Amino acid sequence: MNRVKCPYCFSLNVTIVSADATRELVTIQCLECGKASEIDREQFTVDTEDLPSD
């Protein structure tokens, strides 16, 4: 699974600001450079196989 990166500084230290179901976009904000950007929801999928099992 690819981690979501900031498109400006390529940091992995990003947080979700909002998600819009109608436009299928997720707004993320970088905690390093502070810039916000919208990414396609398809780029932000969670692979459940990578999650630890109980």
Image: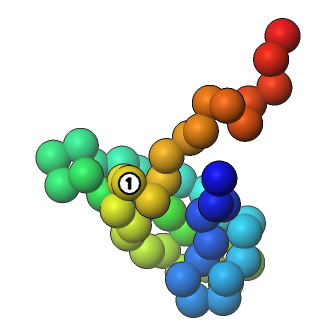
Task: Count residues near mark 1 (Cα–Cα under 10 Å), then give few for <14, some for 14-19, many for 20+.
Answer: few
Q: Is residue 46 left or right of residue 14?
A: left
The residue at which mark 1 appears reads as: 42
Q: Give the colour scheme shown.
A: rainbow
Q: Nearer the viewer, residue 51 or 30?
A: 51
Q: Is 45 above or below relative to 15?
A: above
Q: Nearer the viewer, residue 46 or 39?
A: 46
Residue, x 49% and y 46% (percent of image)? 45
Q: Is 21 above or below relative to 52?
A: below
Q: Quadrant of the C terminus?
A: top right
**Outermost residue, left direction?**
22
Residue, x 80% and y 17% (percent of image)? 53
Where, by quadrant of the figure, is residue 49 drawn? top right
List x then y, in percent, for residue 32. 73, 78
List x then y, in percent, for residue 12. 72, 68
List x then y, in percent, for residue 16. 53, 53
Q: Is residue 5 left or right of residue 44?
A: right
- Which three-letter amino acid code belongs to the residue tagged 1? Glu
Look at the image and tell me whether residue 53 can be seen: yes
Q: How many marks?
A: 1
Per the image, label 1 sits on a secondary structure element best described as helix
Q: Is 26 above or below relative to 48?
A: below
Look at the image and tell me whether residue 17 can be seen: no
**Outermost residue, top direction?**
54
Where, by quadrant of the figure, is residue 37 drawn? bottom left
**Outermost residue, front direction?**
49
List x then y, in percent, for residue 41. 37, 53
Residue, x 59% and y 39% (percent of image)? 47
